[in-house]
Structure formats: structure tokens, C-alpha cells
Image: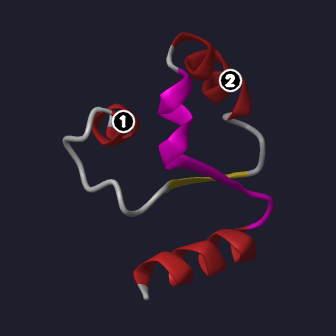
């Protein structure tokens, strides 16, 4: 839901949706086939620490 709201411009687009590990990658890839622009709001982190660092960058 958040992903679609951000993708359509109804939610703040300055911060990404950060997905930890590749669990959701198949869904993201499927969505990107139908709407290539939809992945612009999604970022992947390999670890929780990396996700935390990404959040720190966007919140500063």
C-alpha cells in the first residue's frame, strides 16, 4: 500500500522504501515489468545495519 501511494505521488517521495535482504525482490521485479517507474521508490539493503545507515542518510 505504501509503495503504491509513493509511486503515484500521494505520499512523501523523498524517503525510499527500504527492503532488507532479497525476500521481496521477486515482487519488485514483477511490479517493475508492468510499471518500470515503480521501483524508483524502493531500495534494497543487505543487512539491518545497512538499512539503518540508509535511513540515517535520508533523515539528516
Quarter of the rendering containing residue 59: bottom left
The percent position of residue 31, horizontal first and vertical second, equals 56, 19
Determine whether, in the image, residue 5 is placed left or right of residue 14. Answer: left
Quarter of the rendering containing residue 5: top left
Q: Which mark is residue 29?
A: 2
Q: Residue at (53%, 75%) from the top-left corner?
A: 55
Determine whether, in the image, residue 1 is placed left or right of residue 43. Answer: left
Say if mark 2 contacts mark 1, CB within 8 Å: no
Mark 1 Cα-neighbour bin, 10 Å: few <14, some 14–19, many ≥20: some
Mark 2 or mark 1, earlier in chain: 1
**Which quarter of the image is occupied by the C terminus?**
bottom left
Mark 2 Cα-neighbour bin, 10 Å: few <14, some 14–19, many ≥20: some
Q: Residue at (64%, 16%) from the top-left corner?
A: 30
The percent position of residue 9, horizontal first and vertical second, equals 25, 40
Q: Is residue 27 above or below residue 48?
A: above
What is the magenta range?
36-47
Q: Secondary structure at mark 2?
A: helix
Q: Which mark is residue 7?
A: 1
Q: Residue lying furthest left in this view?
A: 10
Q: Residue lying furthest top in this view?
A: 34
Amino acid at each position: 500500500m505504501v509503495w503504491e501511494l509513493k509511486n503515484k505521488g500521494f505520499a512523501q517521495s523523498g524517503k525510499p522504501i527500504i527492503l532488507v535482504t532479497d525476500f521481496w525482490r521477486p515482487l519488485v521485479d514483477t511490479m517493475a515489468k508492468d510499471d518500470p517507474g515503480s521501483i524508483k521508490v524502493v531500495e534494497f539493503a543487505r543487512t539491518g545495519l545497512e538499512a539503518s545507515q540508509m535511513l540515517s542518510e535520508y533523515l539528516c
